[in-house]
Image (tube, grey):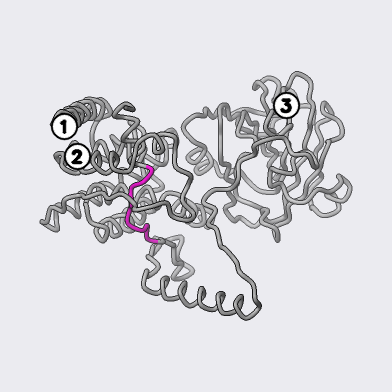
Amino acid sequence: MRGDAAAFEEIVQRYQQVAFRTAYVITGSAADAEDAAQEGFVKAYRALDRFRLDAALRPWLLQIVANEARNRARSSGRRQHLELKLAEGFRPGDAAPSPEAVAVGLDERRRLLAMVNALSEEDRQVIACRYFLELSGEETAAALGLAEGTVKSRLSRALARLRSRVEETARA
Amino acid sequence: MPELEDQLTAVAASIEWPRTPQLRIVRTNRLFEETSPRIVRTSRRYVLAAAAALLIAITLAFTWLGLHTTIYRVPNPPTPSAPPSGTLGSNLDLGRPTTLSEAQAKVSWKIVVPPALGHADAVYLKPAANGGPSGGEVSLVYANAPGVQASPQTGVAVLVTEARGAVNENFFVKIIGPDTQVEQVSVNGHPGYWIAGHPHDFAFSDANGNFYMEQMRLATNTLVFNDDGTIVRIEGEMTKAQAVRLAGSL
């Protein structure tokens, strides 16, 4: 069991960022996301014995933390609107910009993010999970408490709505 | 104009996320394992204050010495790129190069050398003091092996890694990554696992029972087995039959 505690410490270190950000996408509040991540990891530790060997770790952890985030968002009674922002510039220590980032100018990125922020909560969350957190379909399903098929259809509808807004803006 | 999906990917790279809290497990008492962990966040205020104090101290020290420095954050360990010009395997973080006899003198178990491969092209020793598991870790590196293609990035065909400990199946299976399949195998009657695909991490309990996690150096098919308390790992672009045959020759 001693090994389990040390192992879990490694797991916390490895997954705390994606867990915290997933919780942030759900709660829209950094403080609530911190609490959700912390409590989620404690619950995951307690549930370790019930862990199925043939299941993947990351989706399982994300599901626990995301459940915690949803509970927090519900019980606090306040609906924080997730408002993602772009970093103002390239910071030392950041990864080099991707080819996609170079191809899409800062203003374009800013406009697109504003459009994502203006989408419904459902649409915003599924896009944020898949594209901004780069979660897999299985992980997104676990984080949002949906079936994988539902994630696919919801994502497709969300992208269609976003695309039509982008086109409307381009025409205007 | 890039596709919408590409544009979203571009946005992802420049999103400013709130700072991730540093969570760490605090062991409050010796019954920790029987209860549950307390996971605390390092207070941002104290971290910032400590960081600021440290920065000021470093700046003053370097100013006084007339030196300047830049501190870079390295988020991930470097990945092997081109075959190194030095000793084979020197870019794989295997420890310090040594000889088989010197390595043997430093570790408690009898290092097993696959007769089918013969003398290793390079031998490395990673003691616990330098980040290895308790009892140390020995790596045998081969540039050539019959029927096995060497990695173009590392120049390594087969890597054999040995350390004292026990496979922590619960965790190693979990962390091994989604693009892999794990199958239980037997090597000369010893329990083992055939890991096919692109495993990135491996976990085991070392000689002192501590959890030890490290990267798979070649991130390719791997055979792991427990040889009476020594965990032997054989990595290389080979089939299960090849790997089991190789291990069976030990």
Compared with residue B73, is residue A151 higher up or lower down, i.e. above or below? above
Q: Find out whether the residues at labels 3 and 2 contact each other: C-beta distance under 8 Å.
A: no
- Give the letter of the chain under mark 2: A
Q: Find out whether the residues at labels 2 and 1 contact each other: C-beta distance under 8 Å.
A: yes
Picture residue at 19% right of the left edge, 36% below the top = A123
Q: Give the range drawn in magenta.
A: B13-21
Magenta stretch contains residue B2:
no
Q: Position of residue B164 (x, y in %)?
A: 70, 48
**Does dot 3 land on a helix, a strand or a loop?**
loop
Compared with residue B241, is residue A62 higher up or lower down, i.e. above or below? below
- Residue B156 horizontal side relative to residue A146, left or right: right
- Give the letter of the chain under mark 3: B
Q: Where is residue A73 in the image (x, y as percent from the top left)?
A: 17, 53
B83 and B47: which is toward the camera: B83
Label 3, label 2: how far apart the Cα atoms are? 49 Å
Picture residue at 35% right of the left edge, 30% below the top = B6
Callout 2 crowding tier (Cα within 10 Å): few <14, some 14–19, many ≥20? some
Q: Name the residue under label 2.
A: A115
Foreground label between 3 and 2: 2
Label 3, label 1: how far apart the Cα atoms are? 51 Å
